[in-house]
Amino acid sequence: MTEKININVPKATFDVLMKDAESFELYKTDGRTPNKNALYTHIIVNYHETFRAKEAELFNYLKKTLSRSLLPARDPDSLCLEIASHVNKTKASAGRDKFDCSLSVKPTRESEPVIAYVEEYLLAGATLSEYFRNLFSSYASLPQDEREKIVFKPQYDAIAKAVSERKKAFITTTGGNVKKFEISPFALSDAKEELHVYVLAVAKGECMPLRLSRITSVNVLRDAAVFTDEQRRIFEKMLTYGPQFKYGKRETEVKVRLTPIGADLFKKLYVHRPVPTKIEDDCYYFECSYTQIIQYFVRFGKDAYVEYPEKVRDAIFYFHKHACNNYYATKRRQNKKTDAV
């Protein structure tokens, strides 16, 4: 099978797929154009068994329930398939959306055996296009971090194996230049905002978070992964406060003073929000990564002031200082052009 499969899906499903191609950094060789077919291939290859199991569970439940009921003489299997098909169409088109967006799936060496199997054994009266519309809609209904685990299932499973067996692993990563190095994986963790999945590992002597979608290959090694008490302490903090933030050496408590507006912003801006260890009046205390504090509170401007440590306070100060310098420089250049005219 080499022909493309054209699939009509609701806009909600289409939007999720387009977003995932970019969020998971699946690009063509130019490094800018999203490789949509690569995403479709990963979903078909890595999700079809789970999707088939969900379909079988629904079918068996319907058949068992209907078999106990007083029904007119009709084949229970065909009735179950009819109901299941209706349920899938309803789920795939929530809110009565039309199937007005089109996907074009080109079979690849990896996906072609799965597609052939589906066509031969699983359609049960549906078309190939309908089957994969239901599969993609089922995938799109999941949170982003769960979708990431599906798209990068081989890497996720290999890392999970290394973590459970306390073994080192040799990985290849992207995200700029391709890098190959050895890690001691400690845990897999979802970001609190359900955006990405991170591998918490010791690499080159440092505790660091590695985004699952940037790991292209994993080889579990025979060597045991061993962690110091300090490394375990850092990893526990990462699991508590946010796995995506790297910790430096000897990070201490952070004290931030918020204005009433700042306190209101703290309630509303929940993405990457650090968890305070205590709050005393307008003072908030944290024991998380300096990086997390800096990235979160620069958005507050004058409504957040870091009292200590000095390193964090200076980082936020210079962030705004350099931004102001750039704005003033741009304004001076514009004024010179205006005067010249």
Image (cartoon, rainbow, N blue to C red):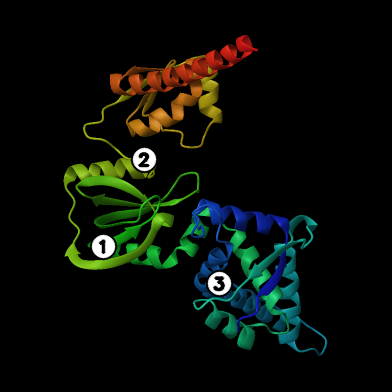
Q: Which mark is residue 245?
A: 2
Helix, strand or loop status at disc 1:
strand
Residue 4 visible within the image: yes
State the separation of the CA atoms marked 1 and 3.
27 Å
Q: Residues within 10 Å of mark 1 (few under 14, many from 20)?
A: many
State the separation of the CA atoms marked 3 and 2.
32 Å
Work out which residue is located at the far top of the displayed protein and give it: 339
Residue type (three-letter) at the residue carrying disc 2:
Phe
Most foreground residue, 300 or 110: 110
User: For this view, does 57 lie left or right of residue 188?
Assistant: right
Labels 2 and 1: the sequence-earlier one:
1
Which residue is denoted by mark 1 in the rendering? Answer: 169
Helix, strand or loop status at disc 2:
loop
Quadrant into which the N terminus falls: bottom right
x then y, percent, for residue 25 = 49, 54
Most foreground residue, 311 or 270: 311
Residue 309 visible within the image: no
Residue displayed at 70% across by 70% down: 7
x then y, percent, for residue 105 = 63, 71
x then y, percent, for residue 73 = 81, 90
Which residue is denoted by mark 3 in the rendering? Answer: 44
Helix, strand or loop status at disc 3:
helix
Residue type (three-letter) at the residue carrying disc 1:
Ala
Residue type (three-letter) at the residue carrying disc 3:
Ile
Q: Residues within 10 Å of mark 2 (few under 14, many from 20)?
A: many
Most foreground residue, 179 or 277: 179
State the separation of the CA atoms marked 2 and 1.
21 Å
What is the quadrant of residue 92 in the picture? bottom right
